Image (tube, helix red, strand yellow):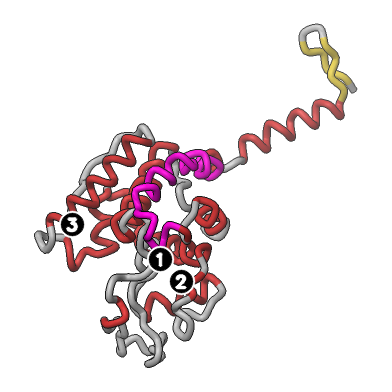
Amino acid sequence: MTMRVGNMLLSTSVMIIVIAFVLIIMMVPKNVSAQSSVADIVTAEFFNSIIDQADDSCAGKNFYSRDAFLNALNSYNQFGSLSSVDDSKREIAAAFAHFTHETGHFCYIEEIDGATKDYCDESSTQYPCNPEKGYFGRGPIQLSWNFNYGPAGQSNGFDGLNAPETVANDPVVSFQTALWYWMQNVRPVIDQGFGATIRAINGQLECDGANPNTVQARVNYYTQYCSQLRVDTGDNLTC
């Protein structure tokens, strides 16, 4: 069987291929373009513009890298993949604003004086603390507390309770735990504006007037990165 289209004759097999192709295109999720563009948004130029501000003596200077981030992204490919490219850019800008603030432009791997602080919540019986380990801030989002290290480890293939130092020793795992925390705690509120992301990360210590200078510092980074990525910031920037 053939069908005339203009001056062309299409065979049945060609027609089937064309129809199948059209159906596949129609079935592709709308967020695929956003998924494939994360590496295009977090360019080497963008990443280096942040880490290059860290002093050469910083431990994180030779630890964090764009390659490590992109490798970690393979485990969390929904990050930076929202319903529009602009929303995806805003999420990426927000995450890197917090990474920048938490690590001092990727200078610090571990929390300053973190080993002297107690981040063991003994009421979290599902994730019991190892008394010989510390659950202080590590990595791009400064993952803290036993109740975060436990599930973050389970999700990313390491023993978060008995080897929390893995987050400070393996740059890919370090970014994986940051993305794990983001997808668990921050992504659900991303549509409420940047201020909601601050509350999700450190709200008790910063929001509602607790530390307005720190909030503004985060907002400044976010505004800067949105400008670099050529997207507006959206509303509700503070908390």
Query: Callout 3, which amino acid?
Result: Thr
Which residue does the numbered mark 2 point to in the structure image? Answer: 167
Which residue does the numbered mark 3 point to in the structure image? Answer: 214
121 relative to 166 in the view: left or right: left
Residue 99 in sight from this viewpoint: yes
Query: Callout 1, which amino acid?
Result: Gly
Badge 1: residue crowd in 10 Å (few <14, some 14–19, many ≥20) = many
- Which quadrant does the C terminus fall into? bottom left
Q: Residue at x 33, y 41 (%)?
A: 225
Q: Count the numbered circles shown.
A: 3
Residue 91 in sight from this viewpoint: no
Badge 3: residue crowd in 10 Å (few <14, some 14–19, many ≥20) = some
Marks 2/3: CA–CA distance: 25 Å
Residue 40 vertical placement versus 51 (above, below): above
First in sequence, mark 3 or 1: give its number: 1
First in sequence, mark 2 or 3: give its number: 2
227 relative to 72 in the view: left or right: left
Magenta-highlighted residues? 34-61
Q: Are marks 1 and 2 in contact (CB under 8 Å)?
A: yes
Which residue does the numbered mark 1 point to in the structure image? Answer: 139
Residue 85 vertical placement versus 156 (above, below): above
Q: Secondary structure at mark 2?
A: helix
Where does residue 187 sit, x and y in percent of width and height? 38, 56
